[in-house]
Image (tube, rainbow, N blue to C red):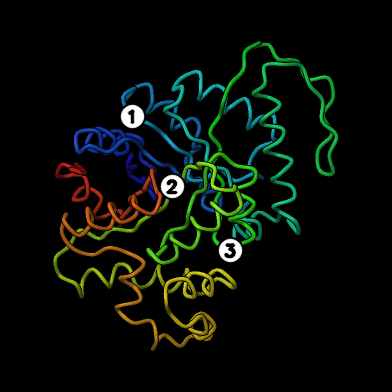
Amino acid sequence: MKPLLSLRGETDLQKMQELVRAASNAGFWGIALSEDLENAGPDIFVTIAVLATKFPEMGFMTDVANQFSRHPVALGTATLSSLDLMCDQFILGLGPGSPATSQVLGLESPQPLERLREVVEILRHISSGKDWSFDGKYFQIHGMKSLRGKKYSPRIFIPGIQDRAIKFAAKYGDGIALSNFSSLGYIEHAMNLVKTTRDGASFAASCNLTYIPVSDKTKGLSYVRPFAERFLSFPGIGETLLEHSGFDPAIASEVRKGSFGRVTNELVESMAVIGGRDALLERLKAMEKLGVEYPVVGTDPSLVGDLVKNKLDLS
């Protein structure tokens, strides 16, 4: 297992460097950075390049890059430059773009997975080391030259929550990036669907995990509950997470109507971890048994220092 520390929400580069150093000392394999276009967050590729230069022992993952943030060729050149710098220590998490981000940026995305399929195909062409052209529905690219003249093997992890997206990731990606607030039951469902789609062929998986390192359960739930309720409110997504976690999918529609009575502590704790280091290690080992090699551990920004304070012993 290769755990990563999520720096979601962090914008100060100096603070990021301190956290990366602490994560390295604590035994994390790498760092995951999200692309926050809605709030004009730090550029993930520039930030990763700076951090990777200072901490060459660490792996890095975009968690995840939005397909609309760059033309596929620009995305490809950023990916190849990252591979030049980090080799197999770099993972490209690449997503179709969330509806919320598309709405804020005024993007039209009626068929985001269809477009993403072309983006991934173009990335494969760019990585081939050969001259190429591409004629698709969304992109027409002609006479591209390969100045590098060598073949690359980028690892592209595609997020998936609902079954259609999981099957898409299994078919076109090198790995799947499972959602935050994924219970063990949901992870098992997703990985079984991946295996069926790929006819049992091996496939990598990352999964976001919210961990609140406090002993006071009530305090921990106060951190987690608002975010869990937000995830459950997303149409289709909330129902899917609930159904495969052993809870009534109708809870999602109740949450969207402002009724939270059935969002029990048991439900919230099935989707996140609250407690000491042993509770985190227990969940990570359970995730590993289900096929998650790259858990992405995140917490409230005010608690991230506590998360990396002690050694993460997975032996």
Lateral position of residue 75 relative to residue 214, left or right: right
* Residue 43, percent from left and from top: 51, 37
Does residue 270 sit above or below 13 in this rendering? below
Q: Distance between the residues labelled 2 and 3?
A: 16 Å
Quadrant of the image occupied by residue 211: bottom left
Q: Which amino acid does label 2 sit on?
A: Ser
Within 10 angstroms of label 1, few (less than 14), some, or many (20 or more) residues? many
The earlier-in-sequence mark between 1 and 3 is 1
Task: Kindly report which numbered mark, 1 or 3, lies closer to the viewer in this rendering.
Answer: 3
Say which element carries label 3: loop
Within 10 angstroms of label 3, few (less than 14), some, or many (20 or more) residues? some
Q: Which mark is residue 206?
A: 2
Quadrant of the image occupied by residue 278: bottom left
* Residue 121, percent from left and from top: 71, 35
Q: How far apart are marks 1 and 2 (CA)?
A: 16 Å
The earlier-in-sequence mark between 1 and 2 is 1
* Residue 159, percent from left and from top: 54, 51
Lateral position of residue 143 relative to residue 199, left or right: right
| Residue sitting at x 75%, y 56% | 111
Q: Which residue extends farthest front?
A: 199
Q: Which mark is residue 162?
A: 3
Q: Are marks 1 and 2 in contact (CB under 8 Å)?
A: no
Looking at the figure, which quarter contains the N terminus?
top left
Question: Is 29 or 203 nearer to us in this picture?
Answer: 203
Lateral position of residue 81 relative to residue 112, left or right: left
| Residue sitting at x 48%, y 63% | 189
- The residue carrying mark 1 is 58
